[in-house]
Amino acid sequence: MPEHRRKQMNSALKLTLLFLSGYGFITQQVVANTWIRRLDEKILERDFLRVTPENTPLLVQLIDDLGLRSVTSIILIITAILISRRFKSWRPINLSILALLLLNLTVGASKLLFGRTKPSTGFDLFFTDSGLSYPSGHAANAVLTWGMFAYLIFRYSHKQPFEGLRLTYFVIIINIAVCLASLYRNTHWFSDLLGGLFIGSALLVATIALDRSITSTRQPS
């Protein structure tokens, strides 16, 4: 393995552990009913910028849809297919499918395990039969799918405007917008979003670490 790929893989693995630790910490704090649950309640009880999921302005709904799995998955897969055809390699498609599978399995299992009710219900309960609020699938999905979208473009094209820093800003802006839209609509607690961001980031960089660990003559960098 080339030295630069080894360093990139090691960096990605370290970030994976860091993000997993962050997810574990947030999860422990939420389940233990600590300060972060008090913050969740204060944000919910605010007397400004309050709407219900059924009464959401169109622009906010469109922003929220940037974290919707059915929308972003299609965009990611189409991008992966186009890149795969251009470079005659299955790697972009395989990486995208792997990332989406990891996302669905991990976040889905976590939601079922914790069973947290959504803020729109007016109750903050854990381990219920119908609660699916923690961690936020929208936040995790926005990080992973748009992050993978940016990563594939960066790895297969260094031309303007697809520079790494600009793509990073692009992903950050989308994630902030999706999280703010969810808070505005009261579809997730603040801690749901934090947990989603951490687990989504962990899965993203874990997928990148795997990509860096396997060399390919058809990958430009």
Image (cartoon, rainbow, N blue to C red):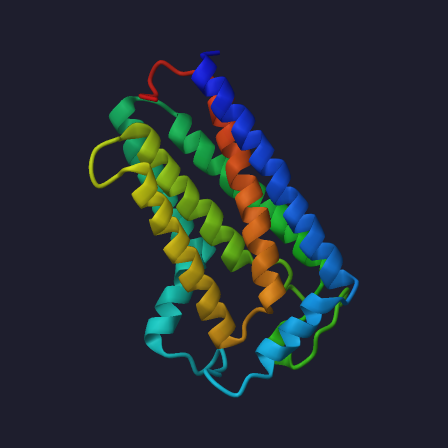
Q: Quadrant of residue 18?
A: top right
Front-most of residues 1 and 169: 169
Q: Residue furthest bottom?
A: 47
Q: Looking at this view, name the residue that lies furthest to the right.
A: 32
Q: Is residue 130 visible?
A: no
Q: Is residue 35 above or below residue 213?
A: below
Q: Residue at x 55, y 57 (%)?
A: 137
Q: What percent of the width, then of the height, locates residue 94?
A: 45, 30
Q: Name above or below for residue 88 compared with residue 196.
A: above
Residue 57 placed where, x, y %? 36, 79
Q: Which of 3 and 99 lies nearest the eye of the viewer?
A: 3
Task: Choose between 157 and 91: the one closer to the eye.
Answer: 157
Lateral position of residue 191 relative to residue 28, left or right: left
Is residue 209 something one can see in this rendering?
yes
Residue farthest to the top? 1
Q: Position of residue 19 (x, y in %)?
A: 60, 44
Horizontally, is 155 left or right of 96 in the view?
left
Location of residue 44 with respect to 77 vertically, above or below: below
Residue at 63% x, 52% y: name it.
Answer: 108
Q: Residue at x 37, y 56 (%)?
A: 173
Residue at 59% in and 48% down: 199
In which image quadrant can residue 151 be found? top left
Q: Is residue 13 left or right of residue 173?
A: right
Q: What quarter of the picture does the C terminus occupy?
A: top left
Q: Position of residue 10 (x, y in %)?
A: 55, 25
